[in-house]
Structure formats: C-alpha cells, structure tokens
Image (cartoon, rainbow, N blue to C red):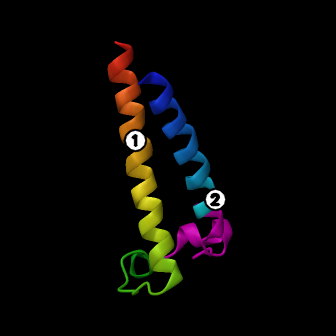
C-alpha cells in the first residue's frame, strides 16, 4: 500500500507541474500582484482549453493532497 501511495504522489506531483506549465499566465508577472480587487474578483468566464486545464489542476491537487494524507495516516 505504501508503494502504491508513494507512486501516486510522485505521478500526481509531476502531472500538476506539467498542467500548470501548460496554462497561460493571467498577470504580467509581479506587477499583476498590485492590481485592484475588480481584477481578482471580476466575472471572467473561463472557456475551452483553459477550463479543462483548470479542472484537471484542481483534480490533481485533490489527488495529491489525499495521497499525502493517506501516506501520513499509514505511517503512524
């Protein structure tokens, strides 16, 4: 079980890196951090490939988090 969870953690972490690198940047670097709240909470609809990559990132993040929690639980 430990080997399966460790493999799942490694694969999900690599896939998260790849999927995040495939996504387009939404800000202009560090200058985008000082933007107003309307940019952060604006109603921008994400469509197409961006939506798919965003949902894959969320799914992989959940898998990564749960696999790490499981590894911790089984090592106790």
Q: Which mark is residue 65?
A: 1
The magenta span reads: 20-35
Q: Residues within 10 Å of mark 2 (few under 14, many from 20)?
A: few
Side of 41 where 7 appears, left or right: right
Q: Which mark is residue 44?
A: none
Callout 1 secondary element: helix
Residue 27 in percent (x, y) is at: 60, 75
Residue at 64% in and 70% down: 31
Residue 74 in percent (x, y) is at: 35, 19
Q: Which residue is mark 2?
A: 18
Residue at 40% in and 58% down: 59
Residue at 41% in and 24% down: 1
Which part of the image, by quadrant, shows the C terminus? top left
Above-or-below relation of 40 to 69:
below
Q: Quadrant of residue 11?
A: top right
Residue 66 in percent (x, y) is at: 36, 39
Side of 52 where 66 appears, left or right: left
Task: Assess whether residue 22 is covered by the magenta stretch.
Answer: yes
Q: As rendered, which of 5 and 61 lies closer to the eye?
A: 5
Q: Are marks 2 and 1 in contact (CB under 8 Å)?
A: no
Q: Earlier in the sequence, mark 2 or mark 1?
A: 2
Q: Quadrant of residue 34?
A: bottom right
Side of 11 where 55 appears, left or right: left
Q: As rendered, which of 21 and 10 lies closer to the eye?
A: 10
Q: As rendered, which of 9 and 27 lies closer to the eye?
A: 9
């Amino acid at each position: 079980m430990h080997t399966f969870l460790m493999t799942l953690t490694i694969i999900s972490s690599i896939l998260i890196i790849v999927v995040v690198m495939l996504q387009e940047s939404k800000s202009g670097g560090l200058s985008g951090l000082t933007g107003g709240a309307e940019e952060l909470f604006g109603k921008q609809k994400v469509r197409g490939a961006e939506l798919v990559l965003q949902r894959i990132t969320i799914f992989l993040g959940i898998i990564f988090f749960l696999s790490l929690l499981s590894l911790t639980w089984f090592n106790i």
